[in-house]
Image: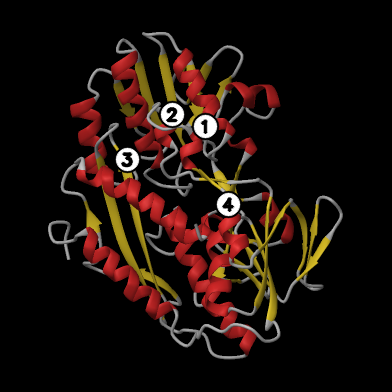
Amino acid sequence: MNHTTFSRRRLLGAGASLAAVTLAGCATTSGGPSIGRVVVVGGGFGGATAARYLKLWGGNVDVTLVERNPSFVSCPISNLVLGGYKQIAEVTRGYDGLKAVGVKVVQGEVTAIDAAGKTVRLADGSALAYDRLVVSPGIDFIAEGIGGLATPAAQERVLHSWKAGPQTVALRRQIEAMKDGGVFVLAIPKVPYRCPPGPYERACVVASYLKEAKPKSKLLVMDANPEVQSKKALFEKAFKERYAGLLEYRPNAELKEVDAAGGVAKFEFEDIKADVINAIPPQRAADIAVKAGLVNVNNRWAGVNWLTMESTALPGVHVLGDAIFPAPTMPKSGHMANQHAKVAAAAIIQLLKGEPVNQTPVVMNTCYSFVSAREVIHVASVHQYNAEQKQPLPVQGAGGVSAAANQVEARYALSWAENIWTDSLSL
């Protein structure tokens, strides 16, 4: 199937079929004694979805979700906030839907995981016992990856805005305050990082705003990678045709250091004076995964058994989303975290019941990117578990990319966001 024949309707149909495959052998039950206690750490796309589907499919599983923030803020669509095309409230949702289906939602922060004792410790000193643990903590940053960013003062001036929320709003304010004729530097780290097309979408959305409001400005996209990492031809076309003279893309340009007070971004061969520096640092699994001993691949990521999403480092602990070491061509994305969660939820229910898990899980991903306020491109893929290689592999001919940016896909993108928020949060 190529991009000329791949349609949104077929993708949605495939999603329904894949859900049925994932559910094989997992009957919905309700009532009766609990078959087990599951604690879920992290209420993003992975954790929220796991909590919901453990209740939806398991019925009598006791599920507790621990999330430090009072509400869910979506990274997908949040780049539109930077362009002034959305408000942060429009990408924010609550956890009441999960509470309504029986998930116990605890606002707090997990500070320690005792895998041997099957308990998690919270910052307030309380503890939660579990039979199975799901950890979906997202990413944290490698502080030493960029010189000059270690202090709180530097981090207040040079924002990453790679976790949607207050920094998204703060970076928007910096962009609004930038003079016409100013310089915006966007520094992209080497892969892997959260959301491969995200920085290039950000470049387009910010350039779209600058073209309208501050047309004398310059946006420099400094990429540590040798080329655009996702939807390459489509993004390059947008850079050249939509933002020529305003946006300049430079590959093999790794940010080495920042002078936050002076507004200088330092690269290997040049220093750039900028009005706004948006530095996205190198990334790894979040701190709690590191502290718990879940990180066992390249000192950055958690390895998993792809049939169950169980950690290869700690038994009884299932890891989801951006914190894991990805399978070949598998992106770190919100949609993929949602898919990881469904594989894990189905497997956990089977394990709690003492029954075999599905041996042929399939996951899929769709990623939409805005290249202007109204036009969007997408990439989609399907990944089938390969028993010989013990990991999901891309299904050849499934998925594809947009033929060109268009306004129809902008409607699809916004509908996709509403649908996945609803699916993950039981809205």
Of the residues shown, which amino acid type is indicated by label 1? Answer: Thr
Dot placed on the residue nearer the N-terminal end, 4 or 1: 4
First-in-chain label (4 vs 3): 4
Instruction: Report, in whole angstroms, how far the alpha carbon at label 2 lies from the one at label 1.
Output: 7 Å
Rendered position, 200 above or below 70: above
Mark 4 and mark 1: span between their CA atoms? 17 Å
Q: Is residue 130 left or right of residue 199?
A: right
Q: Amino acid at mark 2?
A: Leu
Residue that carries the numbered disc 4 in the rendered image: 138
Q: CB of mark 2 within 8 Å of CB of mark 1?
A: yes
- Disc 2, SS: helix
The outermost residue toward the left is 4
Query: What element does badge 4 sit on?
Result: loop
Return the mark for residue 227.
Answer: 3
Q: Residue at x 18, y 61 (%)?
A: 6
Distance between mark 4 and mark 3 Cα atoms: 25 Å
Q: At which x and y percent is residue 75?
A: 48, 43
Q: Nearer the viewer, mark 4 or mark 3?
A: 4
Q: Which residue matches tag 1?
A: 168
Say whether residue 394 is visible: no
Corner quadrant of residue 136: bottom right
Mark 3 secondary-structure assignment: loop
